[in-house]
Image (cartoon, rainbow, N blue to C red):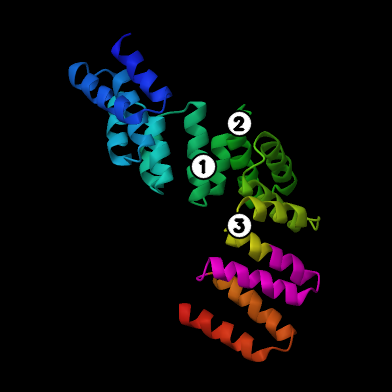
Amino acid sequence: MNDIKEIEEYYSQGNLVAALKKAEEVVKQNPSKEAYNLLGKILKELGEDDKAIDAFMKAENYIEVAKIYISKGMYKDALNVLSSFNDKESRILRALIYLKLENYEEGKEELVGIDDSSPLFYKIKGIIDYYTGDTYDAIRELSIAITLYPLDAELYYYRALAKMKLGMNAEDDLNTAMNLNPYFAEVYFSKGVLLENAGKFEEAVNYYSKAINLKPEYTEAYMRRAKVYMKLGKEEEAISDIKKINDKK
């Protein structure tokens, strides 16, 4: 068994300590791109992001470097790394970055002409289409992504938003998103909006409160809850929420 195979064997067995030790030995003796790439994978899995970036850079695996930057919220660094590449994966990652940066039109442009069937592609395209007003396309793409990967709360959340924009029933999607991620404040907020629009004010207050408990800086939730309190004749509670909003400015 050669050195690279030995590292891969340790890695596949989940023995990361042995894999790391062997990979470090190999890159000292024979600093090949393959060895550095393996070292990067091991370091990434161990949570050593900065060291992993260094190893991937030496391996010239810029896709993995960009993925680490994205996971750390370093979107401009990720864009810089990917700026010279026009392959499919680089374009999809750039579209994801533009989505995170709320540059939806640029993200949309990156996806033009791409033929891909991954849930990530449909997720990015669906969310971008939602924000750029292509609501029916957004529902279709998010539905495809859900079929491919039904455990992502964000997919149901954004499909619910698209349905709400079109006046369609979105409650099931919001409930599924809550079940998949009970800490998703925006989902509780949207369920509150749904209930408020249906005239179920007490229930709406309950969901706005849940959103606030999960995200104490959620100004919009305080605002909506204050309005519902006023509709319920609870002026003292409404004034308290308005004061909290002003305190956060």
The amino acid marked with disc number 1 is: Leu
Residue 225 lies in quadrant: bottom right
**Considering only order in the chain, which callout, 1 or 2, is on the residue closer to the N terminus?**
1
**Considering only order in the chain, which callout, 2 or 3, is on the residue closer to the N terminus?**
2
Residue sitting at 52 percent across and 81 percent down?
Answer: 244
Q: Nearer the viewer, residue 9 or 227?
A: 9
Instruction: Say if 185 sits above or below 29 in the image.
Output: below
The amino acid marked with disc number 2 is: Ser
Q: Nearer the viewer, mark 3 or mark 1?
A: 3
Q: CA distance from mark 2 to mark 1?
A: 13 Å
Name the dominant secondary structure of the magenta segment.
Answer: helix
Residue sitting at 32 percent across and 34 percent down?
Answer: 43
| Rendering coords of residue 91 (x, y %) | 50, 33
Q: Is residue 78 left or right of residue 17?
A: right
Q: Nearer the viewer, mark 2 or mark 1?
A: 2
Tag 3 residue: 182
Magenta segment range? Answer: 191-217
Q: Nearer the viewer, residue 71 or 94?
A: 71
Q: Nearer the viewer, residue 148 or 151?
A: 151
| Rendering coords of residue 231 (x, y %) | 74, 84
Per the rendering, the mark at residue 118 is: 2
The amino acid marked with disc number 3 is: Pro
Instruction: Say if 226 sits above or below 68 in the image.
Output: below
Q: CA distance from mark 3 to mark 2?
A: 26 Å
Residue found at the very far bottom of the displayed protein: 236
Q: How many residues crowd around disc 2 within 10 Å: few (fewer than 14), some, or many (20 or more)? A: few
Q: CA distance from mark 3 to mark 1?
A: 24 Å
Tag 1 residue: 96
Q: Was residue 109 drawn as part of the magenta stretch in this picture?
A: no
| Rendering coords of residue 25 (x, y %) | 21, 22
